[in-house]
Image: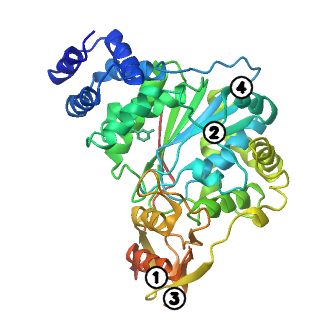
Amino acid sequence: MDARALIARVRDRQPVDAQDLIWFAAGLADHAVTDAQAGAFAMAVLLNGLGEDGRVALTRAMRDSGDVLRWDLDRPVLDKHSTGGVGDCVSLILAPALAVCGAYVPMISGRGLGHTGGTLDKLEAIPGFQTAIEEDRLRDIIRRAGCAIVSASARIAPADKRLYAIRDVTATVESLDLITASILSKKLAAGLEGLVLDVKIGTGAFMKSADDARALAQALVDTANAAGCPTTALITDMNQPLAPDLGNALEVASSMRVLTGQDQGRLLEITAALGGVLLANAGLTDSVGQGAQAILDCISDGSAAEAFGRMVAEQGGPVQFVDSWSRFLPEAPVIREIPAPASGYVAGWNGHALGLCVVDLGGGRHVETDTVDPAVGLSEVVPLGTWVEKGQPLARIHAAREAAADRADEQVRAALTLSDTAPELPPLIHERIG
Ligand code: URA
């Protein structure tokens, strides 16, 4: 097989052969395919697409470019994936809740990308928490705790690791086919029997328009189902942070407040909706409504928090984390309020700008080698539709230094739209696909 022949077929909009894609994905993993060839392939796919069959074949080939986990367990193996947003810490609540509701959840997660936070960075705000876990140990944790949240090892979908890095520097990230194959190759390599996708839309999401979000959700659902993993997507709103707090330790704190019944709101609502779909699809409940109720019940009776505590302890965190979580989470040295510049309704948040503000505070990375400060971020961000008087707090800044807090203050005010009239609030869940 010759990479040039495959690239030429995509360039000329000819159908591609599944065998050729298997060869190409293996070549990405073992470097038989050069960077130049990978970049040319990515650009040809971005411009011309692969078609549905080609997209499924590429996803399967990238999944099979490394290890594919096989489970022999008495309960279904399930997971959730979000396309990324701000204040989105659903995974921390949903993984243990699903484990209590009868699923096994080997969640392979990522780090912050662009303006969005990453589940691994959030969990690493817990002292001692390890996310790089070998396969044997992962199997052990799944059997004992029911859930684990880990990074992809070098052996999971290595073709994606290589192609993603090349896409990042060749302006080819934004291809529906490549995004689909990239996300699903890693998820399907975890040996899932069911998946729910949270496709975000709005100012804090990668997809800003309903048409783009719907197209991505449909591509992901069709491809995952065709690859043998029953999958449904919910298109959900990201026009404001999902949790009121943004930043790594701050989002662990948000999740703990939901898990211990001290907080409810949109984070809990979306967790129950996604969990309900997964439990019903897997036959663990008779309906989506019963599934959502099961998630809410295990949160209100404290069993989801206990499961979270077991996972934290198994992954190296403090054994007593759930009982006294605030004692273990780092605090920023500078904490200050941002006063509203005028009175009015909070009519809009630029979620992308809020996410970047957290990155600039040190809560995310500008380049891959940056270290993340777990303590910084924004808390108590006032929700859309709230009336604020001039001088009333819009949010609190958690910063490492006064100068960083000054910059964040400006960024947050610039991200806000105030209005004299109450805004129409978008629904939290827009649509279900699949
Ligand atoms: N997340 C991924 O894993 N891959 C993409 O291509 C985009 C988002």
- What x and y, as percent, mark residue 355? 46, 62
Colour scheme employed for the rendering of this structure: rainbow
Of the four image quadrants, the one with ligand 1 is: top left
> Mark 3: few, some, or many residues within 10 Å (few <14, many ≥20)?
some
Q: CA distance from mark 3 to mark 2?
A: 47 Å
Image quadrant assignment for residue 155: top right
Identity of the residue drawn at 53% across and 27% down: 156
Mark seen at residue 136: 4
Q: CA distance from mark 3 to mark 1?
A: 21 Å
Residue position marked by numbered label 3 in the rendering: 389
Q: Is residue 86 above or below residue 412?
A: above
Q: Amino acid at mark 2?
A: Ala
The front one of 304 and 7 is: 7
> Mark 4: few, some, or many residues within 10 Å (few <14, many ≥20)?
few
- What x and y, as percent, mark residue 351? 43, 63
- Left or right: where does residue 220 sit relative to residue 273? left
**Badge 4 or badge 1: first in the primary sequence:** 4
Q: Amino acid at mark 3?
A: Glu
**Badge 3 or badge 1: first in the primary sequence:** 3
- What x and y, as percent, mark residue 318? 80, 53
